Amino acid sequence: MSTDTRTAKNRLERECALFLVLFLAGIFVLPSIIYLVGDALFGDYGGSGFSTFYGELHSRFRAGDLGVWFLALAPYVVWQLMRVTIRGFRRIGNARQ
């Protein structure tokens, strides 16, 4: 296996691991934060607790609700937007030199 192939494989593995971690954060961590903020600002979720909120969110996720899928993918999308922004600013800075 050539060095370029190994490097590409390592990049792909790192990107897949990053996607998995951020996707899981979007499924577990982000809904928890949304629930806690909503609970602090608006009170109980429909008179029920976190389990009802998360259960409804999970059922909508399995049903293919685009809003819930966006919520799950949001951490990865934000990360990619930050990467593109930083890369753009670096290119602008290098072009000025």
Image (spheres, rainbow, N blue to C red):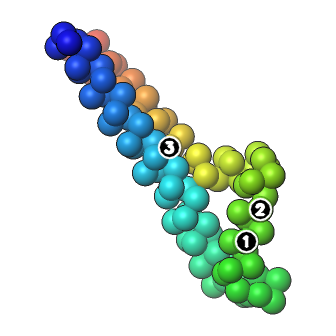
Residue occupying the point 54% across, 40% down: 77
Q: Which quadrant would residue 95 be assigned to in this image?
A: top left
Q: Is residue 41 visible?
A: no
The residue labelled by disc 1 is: 55
* Marks 1 and 3, the one that precedes in the sequence: 1
Q: Position of residue 36 (x, y in %)?
A: 60, 79
Q: Which mark is residue 76?
A: 3
- In the image, taking residue 66 as reference, residue 37 lies left or right, namely left
Residue lying at the far front in this picture: please name it: 1
Residue occupying the point 70% across, 86% down: 49
Q: Quick one: SS at disc 2? A: helix
| Residue toward you, 81 or 67 | 67
Q: Position of residue 18 (x, y in %)?
A: 39, 43
User: What's the amino acid at mark 1?
Assistant: Gly
The residue labelled by disc 2 is: 59
Q: Is the residue under label 3 in contact with that under label 1 (CB below 8 Å)?
A: no
Q: Residues within 10 Å of mark 3 (few under 14, many from 20)?
A: some
Q: Residues within 10 Å of mark 2 (few under 14, many from 20)?
A: few
Q: Residues within 10 Å of mark 1 (few under 14, many from 20)?
A: few
